[in-house]
Amino acid sequence: MERYLKISTVNIRHNLLAHMLAGTLLALAAPAFMGIENLNQQQVAKIMEVYLSLIGIILFVPTYIPDMDGNIYDLIRSKKESMIILHVIRVAEAFMFTVIIGLAFLYLLKKGNCEFSLIKMFYTFMSNSIFLGGLGMFIFSIFNQLPLAYMIPLVYYIVNYGSDYKHLGNFYLFSMQAYPLADKKYLFISGIVFIVSSILIAKGKTLK
Amino acid sequence: MFISLVKQECKMWIKSVVFYAYIIILFLFYVSQMGDGMAIKEPQPGKDNYGTVYSKDENAIMNGTLRDLVDEYECESFATYPFGFYKQVILSQDENEKMENCISKLTNKTKEEWQSIINNYYSNFTAGYDENGVYVQEEKVPWSLFVASDLSYDSFKKIMNEITDLIGSGSSYSEKKLKSHGRVAQTYEQAVAEYNDILQKDKVTGAYARLFSDYMGILLGILPAFFVTTRLIKEKRSHAAGVVYSKKASSFAIVLSRYLAMIIVLIIPVFLVSCFSLAQAVYIAHALHVSPDYLAYVKYCVGWLLPTVLFASAVSYLITELTESVLSIMLNVIIWIVSIFADAGNNLIYAGNNLIPRFNEVGKYQLFQDLFFELVRNRIIYTIISVILVGILVILYQMKRKGGYQIHGKVFKDFDSKYQA
């Protein structure tokens, strides 16, 4: 248990900290770009789906950054703890921080007299974030290319910006704004599948 | 030597996964946005709806604006979209008094007079859902508050500037957004004139080339950042920086060859994808018995899209060289979000100072002509800034080569941390 704690502390300090800072800044910058008071559910959904869910890419994609270096990867693989445990710890940290930012932001919106269902908006935010972050992790685990890992989820986000529910169906990221009854479970489950698959792929790969 | 450096860089890109991912993304994005053709049809007489146009009648714009302003004043809140996201503005008492003063100046009536007209209108106005669940509005008294007949358009604009200062950025009362209040139904004659402009002035291909540039610009505002960071990571992995620093080639040659190679591999796939759109547009032109402009796409790709690529690449390259990290991706994302969402209330037709100009319409030749000089100025400015950024980059690279730039080489990292991690 002590070793897991050490792993998680070191990961936060040397890998995730800058990304946590970037995610926090993204959330803190929101009032400068948009109103966070007296919004209705549709307007809150837009903020959570279009703006804040980018945090998923910021926090989840860096999971495999320390492993990019072949020497470090071999060093980590030689340790007692399996790669899966290591990656699960990193993903758990990213997940927890995403939850913290999401809940804090929604609390701020509630304080600003916005009218929305907290559970629904939190679920919307987590589904989008996990999907985008999971997609980035999946690409990263296959190609071991950080730019590609950021590029694919961002391009998917851009495609959603220019598309609609009719074309992307249950995988449309911005569904809650236009269709309050849209179900985000497909995005949520796909995100989890991407994350789990990426961890399994990353375990089995060899780096040159 | 310079040409061989450029060739070498291009060869490296041709072997890169990121390059092929980029081509696939470009093509799929084009198909998803323009794949269904968007064929143009000659307007038929006797239809109920020919779309809408911005009225050039200053009176229509002034009265439309006044109506929207008074509606928001009555609701005691003003909608702004500074970055495409709704932001509610509620005025303080002082600001409210200034707003009332502006409305008095617009209508040349005292506050009591125009307030009385408004109260009479709203007390005879009903809105709600009928038994079928349809939202209906009923106006028992017609709207009767109009701008003063002797108010010139210039004076009107001055008052609108005062109002914009009160409400803040992103309101629909700024000068460039005023015409959005004067949207009127397009007549059959106007629709025919617009259709003829597509055939005779745009020669069909020009209209589609504009739409193609509109869509591709969205991607090209951000994708260059990934090429730059790929280059950085490749260099770091191969530990090639030291070797390159010791070579005979000047910093100018090294930096410019890398930059030019990146521009080449970014813009050539755009030309290739544009051939698909060109083929569609040429087919439509021939079907309408019009001789197309075969060079329309080349003109728009070079004049409209290339400056976006130049700027996005230059900014990314400079930030990456400065920080030796992937921070440039984040910075480019911020620039992209601001560019895309900043003018989102403009019906996707704008240039201004935006990195990603928009013109999300087929045709609308006259509207494009109104925007043309603004677009040209925009593209020239971004090209000049890109050249300046590349100049700074060369100086930075030279400093690094001579060993004069040492902040542990990176921001927020020290050499041992990655091993400790």
Image (cartoon, coloured by chain):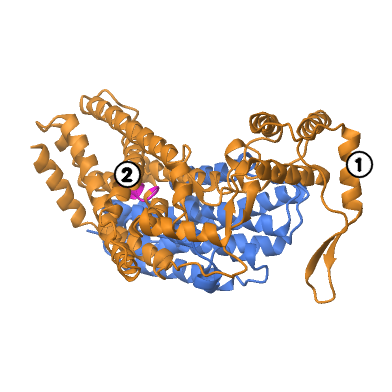
**Mark 2 against mark 1, which lies toward the viewer?**
1
Residue B343 found in image quarter: top right
Q: Residue at x 31, y 39 (%)?
A: B317
Check disc 1: other Cα within 10 Å, few if <14, some if 14-19, many if 20+. Answer: few
Shade of chain A as shown in the rendered figure: blue
Judging depth in this view, the residue of B302 and A21 nearest the camera is: B302
Q: Which residue is mark 1?
A: B116
B371 sits to left or right of A170: left
Q: Which residues are magenta?
A: B221-228
Q: Residue at x 27, y 62 (%)?
A: B275
Mark 2 and mark 1: Cα distance apart in space: 54 Å
Check disc 2: other Cα within 10 Å, few if <14, some if 14-19, many if 20+. Answer: some
Q: Residue at x 87, y 33 (%)?
A: B111
Three-letter amino acid code of the residue under disc 1:
Ser
Query: What number is the disc on residue B303?
Result: 2
Badge 2 marks a residue whose secondary structure is helix
- Chain bearing tag 2 is B
- Chain bearing tag 1 is B
Residue B125 to residue B251: above or below: below
Q: Position of residue A35 (x, y in %)?
A: 68, 45
Residue B379 in sight in this render: yes
Query: What number is the disc on residue A78?
Result: none
Judging depth in this view, the residue of B264 and A124 nearest the camera is: B264
Residue B82 in sight in this render: no
B401 sits to left or right of B325: left
Q: How many marks?
A: 2
Considering the whole magenta stretch, tell me its main secondary structure.
Answer: helix
Shade of chain B as shown in the rendered figure: orange
B71 sits to left or right of B36: right
Q: Residue at x 47, y 42 (%)?
A: B370
